[in-house]
Image: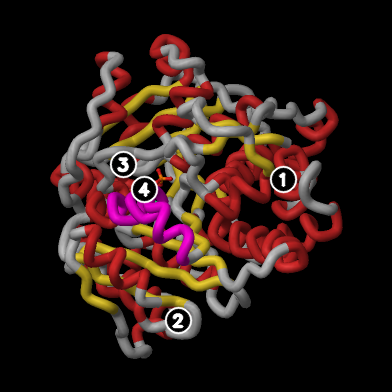
Amino acid sequence: MKYYSTNGKAPLATLQKAVVKGLAEDKGLYMPQSINPLPQSFFGSIQDLSFQEIAYQVADCFFGEDVEADALRKIIYDTLSFDVPLVKVTENIYSLELFHGPTLAFKDVGARFMARLLQYFIRDLKDSKDLKEVNVLVATSGDTGSAVANGFLGVEGIHVYVLYPKGKVSPIQECQFTTLGQNITAIEVDGVFDDCQALVKSAFMDRELNEHMQLTSANSINVARFLPQSFYYFYAYGQLKKLGLADNVVACVPSGNFGNICSALFGKRMGLPINRFIAANNENDVFFYYLQTGSYYPKRSVQTIANAMDVGAPSNFARIYNLYNRSHEAICAEISGATYTDEQIACTMRECLKETAYQLDPHGACGYRALQELLHEGEIGFFLETAHPAKFKQVVDEICGTDIEIPARLQAFMKGEKQSVSMSKNYADFKAYLMSR
Ligand SMILES: *Cc1c(COP(=O)(O)O)cnc(C)c1O
């Protein structure tokens, strides 16, 4: 499979190049040249397949031409060693709990998959050239950093730099990437998430720096990070089918950089029978505005209690726009939007807990509320519960009057010692730091 750039001015790339480079030369995002549909027989028996088997079949469609079957199967089985429960919340609303992975983040799957795939490709590169090390740069508003750091921890030949906005990630999230050591370096940036993302983007575009070190991205701009997230949607569909509820399915995705929902839209192109999608936003709602008006105006992000969605310029918008041939009408036909203030999110969390006994986190709350408001008669909706509520314990307890338990896996991180490098938001400082490495 060859990959083209959304900006259309870069040469076609192999999967290996797309994964190792992250971003195309013209700053565009890589897209697969074709999307292969899965056979009807697959959807006929999907309800009987394990999560791993479903994921393998889907991954084979995307990556099968470029990765040996045995290696791909091993990568998948190594990546997906945890459960993804579909929990009934109301009569027609289900929660797909994506927080049972190693760092309790849905990004664990993409991060681990990418780490393994990159490792697979580096092995090839090492045979041909004298490649010393690949350096992964990742900007995070919280969850990406922990998932990527843990996914790549101890992987030989790869060093990870996690850039995060000072004082704007929850204490538990911060522990998950500042206490690891080994091949993981945490960089605390005096700015907001968009500043971190801008530093990473500038670094990729800097020829001198790229001659000094091999750089790639583990944000959802990387095809190996975002595409594996489609596994979740196939599995959710299979579980609904098992319950006899798969005729009229709506998927609702709390969205920030739009990598997660974008992977689902690829799934639909592969034949996944999900009827329509809802992108739920917090107050960072440039996509919602685009749906209403047809105009896309990225802006500076504002801080909310659903901080992993505090993105003012969602990078995967370019992929969605491209996937639908730049047609606002085509996009609106399959995707609708919603946007909620912190106050609405808090209110939703309290009411859901009271009425259904289900504990939402602030991100999942956006998804749940959007389904409550936008689901039609006869539809079954599932939203992605993208974070474990304990990750936002302080906020959640304050809103709901609870004292939620912190899972042992999270507590383990909190015992480690925090180590990070302080950085201004000026690119010159960041570059000087990397050049000295
Ligand atoms: C990353 C993240 C999101 C947003 O996902 P995108 O793929 O960036 O749209 C939502 N919720 C949580 C908890 C996240 O970590």
Question: Is residue 210 magenta-colored?
Answer: yes
CB contact under 8 Å: marks 4 and 2 = no
Please give the name of the residue rendered at 25% of the width and 44% of the height, measured from the top-left corner: 348
Q: Which residues are magenta?
A: 197-212
Q: Is mark 4 within 8 Å of ligand 1?
A: yes
Of the image marks 1 and 3, the number of the one nearer the N terminus: 1
Residue 360 appears in view: no
> Is residue 10 in sight in this rendering?
yes
Element type at marker 3? Answer: helix
Q: Which residue is mark 2?
A: 408
- Which amino acid type is marked by label 4? Gly
To which quarter of the image does residue 129 belong?
Answer: bottom right
The residue that disc 4 covers is 364
Circle 4 crowding by C-alpha within 10 Å: few under 14, some 14–19, many from 20: many
| Tags 3 and 4 touching, CB below 8 Å | yes
Q: Is residue 399 above or below residue 256?
A: below
Q: Mark 1 or mark 4, which is nearer the start of the sequence?
A: 1
Could you say where residue 39 lies in the image, as x and y percent from the top left?
Answer: 81, 28
Q: Name the residue carrying label 1.
A: 59
> Which mark, by number, is residue 325?
none
Query: Which of the two labelled residues, at mark 2 and mark 3, occupies the earlier sequence position?
Result: 3
Q: Secondary structure at mark 2?
A: helix
Q: Amino acid at mark 1?
A: Ala
Dot 3, crowdedness within 10 Å: few (<14), some or many (≥20)?
A: many
Please name the residue that numbered disc 3 is placed on.
Answer: 366
Image quadrant in which you'd find residue 234: top right
Q: Where residue 302 appears, x then y in whole percent? A: 16, 46
Is disc 1 placed on a helix, strand or loop?
A: helix
Tell which tag, 4 or 1, sits nearer the viewer.
Answer: 1
Q: Position of residue 368 (x, y in %)?
A: 36, 40
**Residue shown at 72% from the left, 45% from the top:** 59
